[in-house]
Image: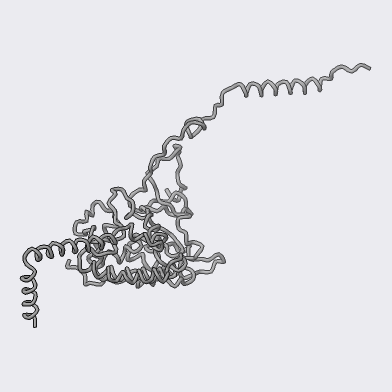
């Protein structure tokens, strides 16, 4: 079966001639470049905040955080944390993003009230995703094997080292680093219907690192 | 009968005369009170220094017995909102051991009628109303303050 298709392909190329084949090859490269350019165009912060749901809520929260503005000016924008960099995972995420377009059309979170009602659920999606891939997007920039613990403050140095030894990943402790946290149950006053302590401070997923 | 100016009237008049001279003297003299500002009110503002919070350090000794302890670490980016209290994330009784922090004082567990609660009273939710971090600013005025005997 495969041999038949292969033979048909070769016959087609032979019939078309070498010039045509070369032209098709070049246009294939151009098409691939155009496809990637279009995909990268949706990979920019300006594109993400073109939806008002994003611009009014999470972008405004992100503006107060260290990933937006800091001493050295080294920043992370929307795709740096929310879109994987390697091609296969990036394509999968882009296909999943059709769900976001769908909800944008439906208007599921198009007011602040609706957004805050869904904030816990959306946050939990991201927390689970990052825990599942061992905070891969954090590690795009932050390589903890090169942490200079002498430069960190005492608390960070201690907690980073004990955390990694216990097998924790970045998102286990650094929730809320870029956007406002949803309600979290801290047993103060009335129940808020927020994230439980188990969800907020999950136990380590992978076994502890070798000592 | 012709009345001459009495001695009482004379003394009152003399008093008024003295006050008038004093008022004139005060208006004519320069103000002698110096200001903390260091310059006239209408002059341009001096740029304030950028004060940084002091880095993590061991607990700071109290100066008053009832003083809310100072925060000996940097608290930049730590928010207290309706949704989440960042301070409690380390200092709550359920978290302090794992985080190596001091726990919240038991005095914070009473509601306003004095009933003991099982966790922080909502009236003590906003930690930074009383507890503050320290910056590297120098005191504006030199002083010789000493804590009370029991704290020295």
Instruction: Decide which of A188, A179 is in the foreground and name it.
Output: A179
Q: Position of residue A85 (x, y in %)?
A: 22, 63
**Residue B10 position (above or below residue A8):** above
Q: Position of residue A191 (x, y in %)?
A: 46, 72
Residue at x-position 37% and y-position 48%:
B53
From the viewer's perspective, is A1 left or right of A42?
Answer: left
Q: Is residue A44 visible?
A: yes
Instruction: Decide which of A176, A1 is in the foreground and name it.
Output: A1
From the viewer's perspective, is B138 left or right of A21?
Answer: right
Colouring convention used in this rendered image of the protein: one colour
From the viewer's perspective, is A157 left or right of B2?
Answer: left
Residue at x-position 42% and y-position 60%:
A56
Tell me where residue B93 sits by quadrant. Answer: bottom left
Residue at x-position 7% and y-position 71%:
A15
Q: Quarter of the image for the N terminus of chain B: give it.
A: top right
Instruction: Decide which of A171, B88 is in the foreground and name it.
Output: A171
Task: Looking at this view, name the residue that lies furthest to the bottom.
Answer: A1
Task: Looking at this view, name the residue that lies furthest to the right.
Answer: B1
Q: How many marks?
A: 0
Q: Position of residue A70 (x, y in %)?
A: 32, 50
**Residue A66 position (above or below residue B143):** below
Tell me where residue A198 sits by quadrant. Answer: bottom left
Q: Position of residue A20 (x, y in %)?
A: 10, 65
Q: Is residue A166 visible?
A: no
Residue at x-position 27% and y-position 53%:
A152
């Amino acid at each position: 079966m495969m041999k038949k298709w292969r033979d048909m392909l070769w016959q087609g190329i032979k019939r078309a001639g070498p010039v045509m084949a070369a032209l098709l090859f070049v246009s294939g490269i151009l098409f691939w470049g155009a496809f990637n350019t279009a995909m990268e165009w949706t990979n920019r912060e300006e594109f993400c905040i073109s939806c008002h749901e994003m611009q009014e809520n999470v972008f405004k929260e992100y503006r107060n955080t260290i990933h937006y503005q800091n001493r050295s000016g080294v920043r992370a924008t929307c795709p740096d944390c929310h879109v994987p960099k390697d091609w296969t995972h990036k394509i999968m995420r882009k296909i999943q993003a059709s769900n976001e377009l769908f909800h944008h059309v439906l208007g599921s979170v198009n007011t602040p009230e609706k957004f805050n009602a869904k904030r816990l659920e959306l946050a939990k999606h991201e927390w689970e995703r990052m825990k599942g891939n061992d905070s891969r997007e954090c590690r795009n920039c932050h390589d903890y094997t090169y942490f200079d613990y002498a430069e960190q403050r005492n608390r960070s140095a201690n907690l980073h080292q004990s955390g990694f030894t216990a097998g924790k990943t970045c998102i286990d402790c650094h929730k809320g680093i870029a956007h406002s946290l949803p309600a979290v149950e801290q047993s103060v006053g009335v129940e808020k219907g927020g994230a439980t302590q188990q969800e907020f401070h999950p136990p380590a997923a992978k076994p502890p690192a070798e000592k | 009968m012709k009345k001459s100016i009495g001695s009482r009237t004379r003394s009152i008049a003399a008093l008024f005369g003295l006050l008038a001279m004093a008022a004139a003297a005060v208006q004519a003299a320069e103000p002698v009170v110096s200001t903390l500002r260091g310059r006239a009110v209408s002059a341009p503002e001096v740029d304030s220094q950028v004060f940084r919070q002091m880095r993590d350090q061991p607990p700071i000794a109290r100066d008053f017995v009832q003083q809310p302890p100072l925060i000996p670490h940097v608290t930049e980016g730590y928010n207290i909102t309706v949704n989440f209290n960042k301070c409690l994330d380390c200092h709550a009784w359920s978290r302090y051991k794992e985080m190596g922090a001091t726990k919240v004082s038991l005095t914070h567990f009473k509601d306003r009628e004095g009933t003991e609660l099982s966790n922080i009273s909502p009236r003590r939710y906003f930690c930074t109303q009383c507890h503050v971090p320290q910056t590297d600013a120098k005191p504006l005025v030199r002083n010789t303050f000493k804590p009370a005997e029991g704290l020295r």
